[in-house]
Amino acid sequence: MFDSHCHLTDDRLKDDVGAVLDRSRAAGVTGVVSIASDAEDGEAAHAIALAWDDVWSTAGIHPHAALAATADDRALVEELITRPRVVALGETGLDYFYDTSPRAVQCDLFAWHLEHSARSGLPVVVHSRDAEEDTAAVIREADPRATGVLHCFAAGTLLFDTAMELGWYISFGGMVTFRNFTGHDFLKAAPVDRLLLETDSPYLAPVPMRGRCNEPAYVAHTCAAAAAIRDVPAADLGCTTDLNARRFYRVSR
């Protein structure tokens, strides 16, 4: 298995990364990508990636941080994506649920990430919440060389269809284990070669770990639930999504 999206720099994980990774390996996780939330976080994630052979990182600015992002922050992201073990841009995207940054600012920064994806060849990790129409529009308007993944996908026919049409990947996290998960049809319909699994740790711990700090080892629970929904063996889905993540991020074992 491969945890395609986690936040090892979060305060709940960063002081115990070695033990967290030991537990993930014991659970059968062969690789982890630590996702950046802003430029400074990208530097911290990169330091962790340099310290561990089975960790990679990203560089980008989350929509929550869009308003505060400076020209220097953008310059740092541009520099970070040239470093070894930095494998994607993001996470970026649109969040109209919290609206912590003006929507026009979010859209501009999202488009900027996609532009750098097209230039660099690195994929983009996309966050979208209550912003399906605008997320789909920004993706469609981008340079077709840009590619990415819709992370922690739950629902949204327009966005799902847009991703499928453009050859993007879809990632599912701990929400697939929740009783109120509404994305069963999307999880079943996603092409098996464009399907990723994630924890988004320390957030969204899966059942039966609800209430705990999420961590990469718990992707095993997400894998089991996703496999049950797709009616395939969990071991097969784990291997397939591991290979998919390595193809998407262009990393080897």
Image (tube, rainbow, N blue to C red):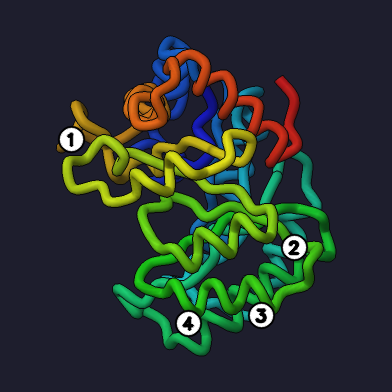
Q: Which residue is mark 4?
A: 67
Dot 2: within a 10 Å radius of its alpha carbon, few (fewer than 14), some, or many (20 or more) residues? many
Tell me the quarter of the picture where residue 247 sits: top right
Q: Which residue is mark 3?
A: 71
Q: Nearer the viewer, mark 4 or mark 2?
A: 2
Residue 72 drawn above or below residue 213: below
Residue name at image x 48 percent, y 68 percent = 158
**Front residue of this view, candidates 4 and 82:** 4
Residue name at image x 50 percent, y 79 percent = 134
Indicate the amino acid at tag 3. Ala
Q: Is residue 130 left or right of residue 51?
A: left
Indicate the amino acid at tag 2. Ala
Q: Residue furthest top?
A: 26
Which of the two labelled residues, at mark 3 and mark 1, occupies the earlier sequence position? 3
Q: Is residue 250 left or right of residue 56?
A: right
Indicate the amino acid at tag 4. Leu
Which of the two labelled residues, at mark 2 and mark 1, occupies the earlier sequence position? 2
Q: Which residue is mark 2?
A: 146
Q: Which mark is residue 210?
A: 1
- How far apart in space, not on screen, are marks 2 and 1 (Cα)? 35 Å
Tell me the quarter of the picture where residue 54 sits: top right
Q: Secondary structure at mark 3?
A: helix
Dot 1: within a 10 Å radius of its alpha carbon, few (fewer than 14), some, or many (20 or more) residues? some
Which of the two labelled residues, at mark 4 and mark 2, occupies the earlier sequence position? 4
Q: Nearer the viewer, mark 3 or mark 4?
A: 4
Q: Quadrant of the C terminus?
A: top right
Which of the two labelled residues, at mark 3 and mark 2, occupies the earlier sequence position? 3
